[in-house]
Structure formats: structure tokens, C-alpha cells
Image (cartoon, rainbow, N blue to C red):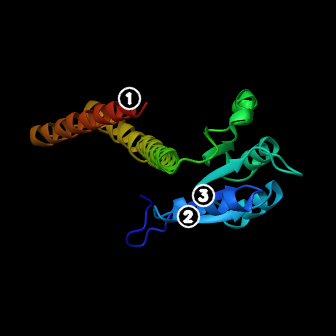
């Protein structure tokens, strides 16, 4: 079923067919399954509707005047969001020889006329599920990219704000140990400082190695 609960909108299917009866038939089958439907009677109108109200899936007739299904598909794919929108060809049995051309222009699937309701809903549901999965994968990839960016920024912080000051403290502490007369407690305390700073410096270098 389409997404209809809560704040989720019903998924929108754009039906493109120059035959009014075919459009009405597809509309009835889809709306009864919970999908929202937009109708276009030509390829030109389909392109306009795609821009003003982008659908989640397109059912596209092959043989239409002015702009046939092949050219319409090519132009749809070139629009923003068009590359990721499932497109299903609606074709008569005597048009099956055109399927090679359909694959070339980027059609995801096809249905033969007259449309079988069960087959239509299975194809639509499957393609929309794949689209949702792809969208979730893209979100995960974007989140991972942000995480990588944050890690890079942390590495820069480690290098500039920790590594250099620690190196300066270590160098000065070692210099003091070798050049200044210190009491035994003072020397022990300074030795502890050198040991602690050296350990922190090693930790910083390990963090840099992990970030790389």
C-alpha cells in the first residue's frame, strides 16, 4: 500500500497516456490501492506536471502523438529528480519489439496492455519500495560523509591545538631538567611532567594514525 499514515503523504504516480479510457482505468486501480494519481494526456503535459509536482513513479505510454514515450522518457530523465524516478512503459503486445529501445532510454520496467490490476500494483509497489531503499541508503551515505568531515576537522584540531603545544611543553621540560639546578622533589616532579606529556604526545600520534 502507499504511504498514507500520519504526516506521510500518499505516493504520487503520474499516468501518461493519450487515451482517456486507459488513463481512467489506471487511475481507478491506483487510487483504490491508496496512491495519489496525476494524469497527463501527452508527453509535453507530463514534462510540465513533473516539474510542478514531481511524482514518485511514472506510468508512460509508448505510442503518443507529438512526443512519444521514448523521447518523453529521455526528457524526464534530464529533469531534476528524473534520474531517480522509476518509469514504467505501458505497451501493447505488438510493441514488444521496442523493448530494446526502451532499455536504451532508461525505462525501469514495462506493462503490457490491457493492464492487469494485480500486475500493475505489484510492479508499482516493488519499484517504489526500491526507491525508498535507495533514498535511505543515500541518507546513510550523507551521514557517513558528514562523519568523515567531522573526523577530518578533529584531526586538524589535534594537530594544531594539541600536538604543537605538547611538543613545546615537552621540549621546555627536558631543557629544564638538563640545565637548571633542581631539588630532588623538583626534579622528580619535572620528570613526571616529561613522562605525562610524552604519553599524551604518543596518544595524539595514535589518534592521528587512526584518523588517517
Q: Name the residue under label 3.
A: 26
Residue 97 vs 86, above or below: the answer is: above
Instruction: Work out whether residue 115 can be spotted.
Output: yes
Measure the C-alpha gap from mark 3 to mark 1.
59 Å
Q: Which of the two marks, 1 or 2, is nearer to us in this view?
A: 2
Measure the C-alpha gap from mark 1 to mark 2.
61 Å
Q: Name the residue under label 1.
A: 209
Query: Going 46% across and 46% down the picture, which residue do you hit?
Result: 122
Q: Which of 16 and 113 is in front in this view?
A: 113
Furthest-left residue in view?
A: 185
Viewed as shown, does residue 171 lie left or right of 81?
Answer: left
Viewed as shown, does residue 168 lie left or right of 120?
Answer: left
Q: Which of 51 and 176 is in front in this view?
A: 51
Q: Which of 141 and 145 is in front in this view?
A: 141
Q: Which of marks 3 and 1 is nearer the N terminus?
A: 3
Image coordinates of residue 7 in percent, x first then y, are: 42, 72
Residue 45 vs 57, above or below: the answer is: below
Query: Going 45% across and 47% down the picture, which residue do you hit?
Result: 129
Q: Which of marks 1 and 2 is nearer the N terminus?
A: 2
Secondary structure of the residue carrying tag 1 is helix
Image coordinates of residue 140 in percent, x first then y, are: 43, 46
Query: Going 42% across and 67% down the picture, which residue do you hit?
Result: 4
Query: Going 89% across and 52% down the picture, which residue do you hit?
Result: 66
Q: Name the residue under label 2.
A: 28
Amino acid at each position: 500500500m502507499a504511504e498514507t499514515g500520519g504526516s506521510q503523504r500518499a505516493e504520487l504516480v503520474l499516468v501518461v497516456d493519450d487515451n482517456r479510457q486507459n488513463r481512467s482505468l489506471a487511475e481507478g486501480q491506483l487510487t483504490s490501492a491508496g496512491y495519489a494519481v496525476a494524469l497527463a494526456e501527452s508527453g509535453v503535459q507530463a514534462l510540465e506536471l513533473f516539474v510542478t509536482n514531481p511524482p514518485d513513479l511514472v506510468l508512460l505510454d509508448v505510442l503518443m502523438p507529438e512526443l512519444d514515450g521514448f523521447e518523453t522518457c529521455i526528457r524526464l530523465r534530464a529533469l531534476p529528480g528524473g534520474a531517480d524516478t522509476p518509469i514504467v512503459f505501458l505497451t501493447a503486445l505488438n510493441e514488444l519489439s521496442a523493448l530494446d529501445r526502451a532499455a536504451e532510454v532508461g525505462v525501469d520496467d514495462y506493462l503490457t496492455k490491457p493492464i492487469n490490476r494485480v500486475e500493475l500494483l505489484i510492479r508499482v509497489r516493488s519499484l517504489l519500495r526500491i526507491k525508498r531503499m535507495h533514498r535511505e541508503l543515500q541518507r546513510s551515505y550523507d551521514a557517513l560523509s558528514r562523519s568523515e568531515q567531522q573526523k577530518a576537522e578533529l584531526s586538524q584540531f589535534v594537530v594544531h591545538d594539541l600536538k604543537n603545544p605538547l611538543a613545546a611543553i615537552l621540549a621546555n621540560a627536558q631543557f629544564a631538567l638538563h640545565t637548571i639546578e633542581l631539588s630532588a622533589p623538583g626534579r622528580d616532579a619535572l620528570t613526571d611532567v616529561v613522562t605525562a606529556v610524552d604519553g599524551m604526545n604518543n596518544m595524539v600520534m595514535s589518534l592521528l594514525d587512526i584518523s588517517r
